[in-house]
Image (spheres, helix red, strand yellow):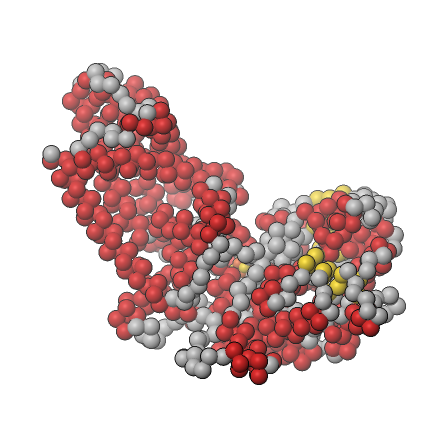
Amino acid sequence: MIKPILFAIALFVTLGVFAWTMRRVFAYFRFTKKKPLGDFGKRIMLTVKIAFLQEKILRRPLVGLMHALVWWGFIVILFGSIEMVIDGLFGTERALAFLGPFYDFLMAAGDIFGLIIAIAIVGFLVRRLFMHIKRFYGPEMKPVSKADANLALIIIFLLMLTLLDMNTGYLLWVDAEGIQQVGYFPVSQWLTGFFVGMPAKEAWLLYQVNWWAHILLIFIFANILPYSKHFHVFMSVPNVFISRLEPLGYIENMENITKEVKLMMDPDAAFADQPEDEGEPERFGVKDVEDIYWTNYLNSLSCTECGRCTSVCPANITGKLLSPRKVMMDTRARMKEKGPGMLKEGKTFDDGKALLGTYITEEELWACTLCNACAMECPVNINQPSLIIDMRRYLVMEESKGPSGLNTVFANIENNGAPWQYSPEDRMLWAEGLEVPLMADKLAKSENPEYLFWVGSAGAFDDRYKKVTREFVKILNYLGIDFAVLGTEETDSGDVARRAGNEMLFQMQAMMNIEILNGYEVKKIITCDPHDYNTLKNEYPDFDGNYEVIHHSQFLQQMIDAGKLKPAGDALSGKKITFHDPCYLGRANGEYKAPRSVLNAIPSVKVEMERNKSFALCCGAGGGQMLKEAEKGDKEVFMERTEEALKTGCDIIATACPFCMVMMTDGLKYTNNEEEVKNYDIAELVSKGLGL
Ligand code: SF4
Ligand code: SF4
């Protein structure tokens, strides 16, 4: 009788302390912004894939497998822990044994996992203590973070040790007493070999001491977790469940800006939709924790501080201040700091500090290339770039603070419809001497072409990329494709403006373009620019711009697969080609195959860079970086990427994006390789293969 009483007291204290802690942590959610979830079916699938099957952690197979085994082991061992709680409360002995063979299977699996986890934890500790793994370091990793990680690992190790000792004691006891054994314990059975002949009393003591040690360690661990980075043990599954379902390239719309833009563009129609009084206007973007969504806060609580995001961040790799892990850790720390004050005085509580400014500097924010490598890597599916963009939105729209280069870009887009100071009238100069039909002319002849070719600002104005645009049009004409362009009616897609925080300008551009595209009843769009591809495909639907958008790599692949395009000439035979994955084609939209299939159709030698496909390093241009001065660091991102490409011994760096082309061309120039190694777009390579 004494055991159930003692156990009930221990359980009651554990649950009480845990509930008290969680009440405090969850109370802060009320200060965050609301966001609906929806799509529960998809969310369940995502949770199964990422949380239970550990899809993302297994991207790095060896360490990933160790982590995954620990996680799967925890789930299996949890079953035994539930049984211990039942036994503890009701004084039963192996209460779930009635499950028969299933019970035997779970007990055996738990026993094996106990050993696997113990070995994995020793491996993790050795890595943390004796090997200099770069991602475990960084200015944000204070001694307390490291001590916290080590303490949690030691507790897990002790949990496994007590589990195996408990099972061993049980087997020795039933054997000595001649009691019928329930459950199967292969590892512990082997361990009993070290205690042959142990008397029943001692075996019982070994069993019971470890039973109590194990369950009490679980209770203590459960109450340490909310104060440690290992809180993710509780939070990772819910965090994956609430994480984003959209492609990584998609940026969430700001409805309050949409209202403003509609008001500007059509005051009569917009006023008709407006309720009389909407109360205090919401702040644009994120300055402090009360501006974040509840999902951002949950993200921050789930961050394991593993540093996988920071280890792949091109800004961090090249010595800039930005660390996506720090963004998450700062958000959590700031809520912990400001939360108690807001609980007392409400959301308006002001302690003179803010997430943006006190914790995260502008320099960190502007170093981001929005490459999404961090979000791709995060094992608990945190989306760091969305918070970075929200802080940029605050800086640009509330404080009018942006790097001077970007302010010029905004002015140019507003006045000229392109990031550079070119006249909108010159948008078709690239097409001189080519046969390029205009949508307006087609409409005049009552024709509706199958494709709209979206040239994009870089395709129309960047001197190097104009050549790519011309080659691609030659291919379209060679294939006899029914297409047309908007010509001077096209204006910048707004991609750069949005990623640089100027949501207002982005939405104005988007709405102008959509009005024109819808006016022409456009159904299919081809573009060579992955940034515009992403924006038109993923973001324009938020403004009633719904089109089938195809990147030129996908179009070329379709034509090659259909046997209509055979770039089999020997102009490139023997040349070594390496392909640089554009972030907005690859990670942002999952297209890695099409450009490679196109290149494979051209007789030449293909080589991959060390970081390729979803692991590819950004060229350094995205998020507005190409149009402003880079932040301080050890190196330019494009140099890092070019050096990686050169290591393959390639003759040609193939790209499929105007921004990547600029950066890689610069890289070849600065490394004095522009004579030996060439940078071509895949359309140019196809054109060479066709002999056009
Ligand atoms: S999006 Fe890219 S540059 Fe920005 S924080 Fe993530 S990894 Fe770093
Ligand atoms: S944000 Fe994700 S990848 Fe980055 S440290 Fe946290 S858990 Fe790891």
Give the quadrant of ligand 1.
bottom right
Which residue occupies 33% across, 72% down? Answer: 347
In the rendered image, the vertical position of residue 10 relative to residue 483, given as above or below: above
Asked whether, in this view, residue 261 is left or right of residue 182, the answer is right
407 vs 182, left or right, is right
Residue extending farthest to the left is 2
Picture quarter with the N terminus: top left
**With 665 as the anchor, is 511 left or right in this view?**
left
Q: Nearer the viewer, residue 256 or 171?
A: 256
Number of numbered labels in the structure image:
0
Q: Is residue 50 visible?
A: no
Q: Residue at x 50, y 38 (%)?
A: 62
Q: Is residue 649 above or below residue 458?
A: above
Give 300 or 148, whichever is nearer the viewer. 300
Please state the horizontal and vertical placement of residue 371, each as a whole percent of the image: 58, 58
Residue 607 position in % (x across, y down) = 70, 44
Residue drawn at 63 percent across, 48 percent down: 612
On-image quarter of the C terminus? bottom right
Residue 161 at least partly seen = yes
